[in-house]
Image (tube, rainbow, N blue to C red):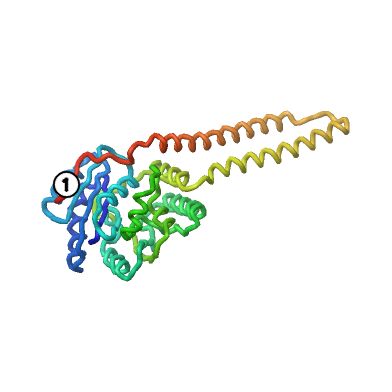
Amino acid sequence: MLSVILPAYNEELMISKAAQVISEILDTENIKNEIIFVDDGSSDKTWEKIESISKEYFNVRGVHFSRNFGKESAILAGLQHSKGDCCVVLDCDLQHPPEKIVEMYRLWQDGFEIVEGQKISRGNEGKLHTVAANTFYSIISKVTGFDMKNASDFKLLDRKAVNVLLNMKEKESFFRALSSWIGFKTATVLFDVKERMAGESKWSTASLIKYAVTNITSFSTLPMQIVTLLGSIMFVISIVFGIISFVQKMLGQALEGFTTVILLLTFSSSVIMISLGIIGYYIARIYEEVKGRPRYIVSHTCGKDG
């Protein structure tokens, strides 16, 4: 059986359409399936729509969070509640083309354990958003050692890969990077990002920046290495100015450069504060992990097993 997982946040306009389109595609191909909507604490009528559609379609189930926990938690919840031999994750807005699920499923039947959906184009995005996204994926690619320039959450995973991800205890996980990191036999399916059928994107610039910072720090200690680099630069600068001051003293020249001293003090203070901020951020991340709180809380479920 194939489990289709759709994280949803304020997507009341897309629930019925997504269930209808995906069910028709998979039923036409005689693929036994279940569709799991995960309501990430929506403030609109998303959950009411999921409950309604679960009564209309026997293959639809729903999971409702007690509050908004984020997309990564919604994906995890969908994987934990799934029963299929393989699972597909895609966006509820259907910008990930659902017809590609069939191609992914056939590759899985051929023996591939992870099938990555890779973007050919990013759709109708603003230039600033595109530049920011390319910068983020360039950094995360160097950090992980995988080419994630066109990576997405749209992918199929065999049950073995799903179980590996579920056994990872880290609270802040980055699904699209971890699913590449775990290995397994992998294939790629190319797709173009579609236009939204209804509604609008829930990602603001601020939320995307926060998402990027969280995922980079959860997957890498690179920012900590920047602290070491800044310290090394300050050490070299101090040696250079120390030599200059010593030579001037030996030659009996008056020491000048009050402005230089002020600039150095300002620069060094900035480096120290930035370094403390980076270290403090990692300490905060450690604090969040050791508290051991659940990654999400389910308040309701619906469907034949609800």
Q: Describe the element under mark 1 as helix, strand or loop.
A: loop
Q: With 81 as the anchor, is 157 left or right in this view?
A: right
Above or below for 269 versus 85: above
Residue 49 visible? The answer is no
- Residue 176 or 209: which is nearer the viewer? 176
Question: Measured from the top left, where is residue 42 in percent x and y?
Answer: 25, 41
Q: Which residue is pictured at 49% across the width and 38% down the height?
A: 282
- Residue 111 or 56: which is nearer the viewer? 111
- Residue 106 or 278: which is nearer the viewer? 106
The number of numbered badges drawn on the structure is 1
Question: Measured from the top left, where is residue 173 in percent x and y?
Answer: 39, 47
Residue at the extreme left of the image, as rendered: 56
Name the quadrant containing residue 59.
Answer: bottom left
Question: Measured from the top left, where is residue 6 in percent x and y?
Answer: 26, 52
- Residue 220 or 84: which is nearer the viewer? 84
Mark 1, residue position: 306
Question: Measured from the top left, where is residue 275 in percent x and y?
Answer: 56, 36
